[in-house]
């Protein structure tokens, strides 16, 4: 019954989103990254199209998709970069190194603009990546443990030494172009789009099993997962996930957000 319910739910969510046209998906690696690393973003799309710039990356912003620009290419080659559904991919790169020092630890959003195959107006999407300080224990890390392939279960893991036994909560969205800020000031990367209500505040167990649970004594879990229906329309669809940890006092700590391309 689980595959059937996952199929029905995704159809209910995805069909209206598909009507909006082409979507760009991507995954930043490594994520989190160190202050001196090169970050690669591998992108695909739901439909054939092209990137709006020969540089691929338009800008990188700090803290939010609307934050200050920390990187922007000055000269871009006059080349035509095509994108399309998986297995077609394009890899873009951004060096986190800056002259004379390092970027501050925190969240950064890589902006990539794109057009559909009819050369319509440029659209914008953002891929979040967390940069961690060199030589210090990293904040909680969210990772995928298997590929996001249609008709399979994509496994997830949380690694958070020092948070042993803490409760965790995950949520999901299609994109990370807006996000929202909690009353505490913490910023969530996930958009409150059509997928978000199926993951939060109570995750649909057919789509998102074990999105609520507890870390083991070492601060780890491999329990969360995403059940991906075998729907051809999902090829190249974006998916974003982020987690939060709660200690015994109720204090909230966020994981890095991750984005993937459904294959």
Image (cartoon, rainbow, N blue to C red):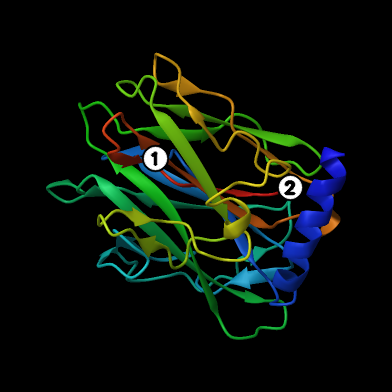
Dot 2 alpha-carbon crowd within 10 angstroms: few under 14, some 14 to 19, many 20 or more: many
Query: Residue 255 has which mark?
Result: 1
Query: Residue 263 has which mark?
Result: 2
Q: Residue pushed farthest top?
A: 217
- Could you tell me which secondary element the residue under label 2 belongs to? loop
**In the depicted structure, whether residue 96 falls above or below residue 127:** above
Asked if disc 2 and disc 1 are in contact, CB closer than 8 Å, the reply is no
In this rendering, the count of numbered labels is 2
The reply, left or right, for residue 77 in relation to residue 71 is right
| Residue nearer the viewer, 110 or 171 | 171
The answer to whether residue 174 is visible is no
* Residue 143 locus on image (x, y percent): 51, 34
* Between discs 2 and 1, the one toward the N terminus: 1
Residue 64 position by quadrant: bottom left
The quadrant of the image that shows the N terminus is top right
**In the depicted structure, whether residue 235 falls above or below residue 47:** above
Residue at figure coordinates x 65%, y 52% from the top left: 89
**Mark 2 or 1, which is nearer the eye?**
1
| Residue nearer the viewer, 65 or 244 | 244
The reply, left or right, for residue 198 in relation to residue 34 is right
| Residue nearer the viewer, 24 or 233 | 233
* Residue 186 locus on image (x, y percent): 29, 53
The reply, left or right, for residue 246 in relation to residue 172 is left
């Amino acid at each position: 019954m689980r595959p059937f319910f996952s199929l029905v739910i995704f159809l209910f969510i995805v069909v209206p989103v598909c009507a909006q046209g082409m979507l760009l998906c991507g995954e930043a690696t490594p994520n989190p990254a160190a202050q001196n690393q090169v970050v690669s973003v591998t992108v695909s799309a739901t439909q054939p199209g092209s990137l709006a710039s020969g540089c691929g990356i338009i800008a990188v912003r700090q803290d939010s998709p609307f934050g200050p620009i920390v990187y922007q290419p000055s000269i871009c080659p006059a080349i035509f970069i095509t994108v399309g559904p998986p297995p077609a991919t394009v890899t873009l790169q951004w060096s986190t190194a800056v002259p004379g020092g390092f970027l501050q630890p925190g969240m950064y959003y890589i902006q990539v603009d794109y057009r559909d195959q009819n050369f319509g107006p440029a659209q914008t999407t953002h891929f979040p990546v967390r940069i961690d300080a060199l030589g210090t224990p990293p904040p909680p890390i969210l990772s995928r443990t298997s590929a996001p392939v249609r008709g399979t279960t994509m496994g997830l893991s949380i690694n958070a030494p020092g948070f042993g036994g803490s409760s965790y909560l995950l949520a999901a969205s299609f994109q990370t172009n807006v996000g929202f800020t909690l009353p505490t000031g913490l910023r969530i990367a996930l958009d409150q789009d059509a997928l978000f209500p199926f993951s939060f505040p109570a995750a649909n167990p057919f789509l998102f099993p074990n999105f609520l649970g507890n870390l083991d004594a070492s601060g780890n879990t491999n329990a969360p997962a995403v059940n991906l229906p075998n729907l051809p329309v999902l090829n190249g669809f974006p998916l974003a996930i982020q987690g939060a940890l709660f200690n015994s006092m109720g204090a909230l700590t966020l994981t890095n957000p991750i984005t993937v391309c459904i294959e």
